[in-house]
């Protein structure tokens, strides 16, 4: 009987590798690279996201509009589309976004 395990690894550059490990071939892995989330730099701590601000056709193709609050970490992630909003001049501005944990609005570390 052949079984498979799904695995997720993170590289030094913050790129996630997702693959399938096989029990019959324990060292075999088929990797797919997933880019870090889209990052938007903003000047206000309160931002809105509808997931479609850059899509022709507007919000009908995105998700419900949500308002997010950037906390002391200097960034927040949209819970719907994973878009990251980074406060210009904040602690996360200029940091490697691939190494920062996901912070949804209202969550704390």
Image (cartoon, rainbow, N blue to C red):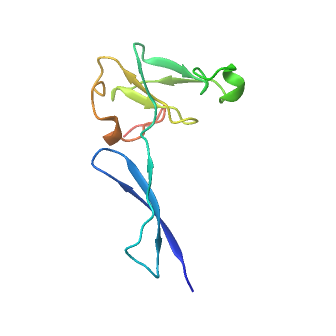
Q: Nearer the viewer, residue 28 or 109?
A: 28
Q: Quadrant of the N terminus?
A: bottom right
Image position, residue 60 (x, y; %): 72, 25
Quadrant of the rendering where the C terminus is positioned: top left
Which residue sits at x=65%, y=20%? Answer: 56
Q: Is residue 2 left or right of residue 28?
A: right
User: Residue 81 appears at what percent x and percent y?
Assistant: 56, 35
Q: Nearer the viewer, residue 100 or 1?
A: 1
User: Where is residue 69 drawn, in percent x and y?
Assistant: 47, 23
72 or 32, which lies in front? 32
**Residue at position x 52%, y 32% in the image:** 78
Who's the residue at 34% across and 35% down the image?
97
Which residue sits furthest top?
43
What residue is at 63 percent from the left and 24 percent from the top? Answer: 65
Kindly give the residue lying farthest to the right in the view shown. Answer: 60
- Is 19 positioned to the left or the right of 10 in the image? right
Residue lying at the far bottom in this picture: please name it.
1
Q: Give residue 75's quadrant in the image.
A: top left
Above or below residue 44? Residue 104 is: below
């Amino acid at each position: 009987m052949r079984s498979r395990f799904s695995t997720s690894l993170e590289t030094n550059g913050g790129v996630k590798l997702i693959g399938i490990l096989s029990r019959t071939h324990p060292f075999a892995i088929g990797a797919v690279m997933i880019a870090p989330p889209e990052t938007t730099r903003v000047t206000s701590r309160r931002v809105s996201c509808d997931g479609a601000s850059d899509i022709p056709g507007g919000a009908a193709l995105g998700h419900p509009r949500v308002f997010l609050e950037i906390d002391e970490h200097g960034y927040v992630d949209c819970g719907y589309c994973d878009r990251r909003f980074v406060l210009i001049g904040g602690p996360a501005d200029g940091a490697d976004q691939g190494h920062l944990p996901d912070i949804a609005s209202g969550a704390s570390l």
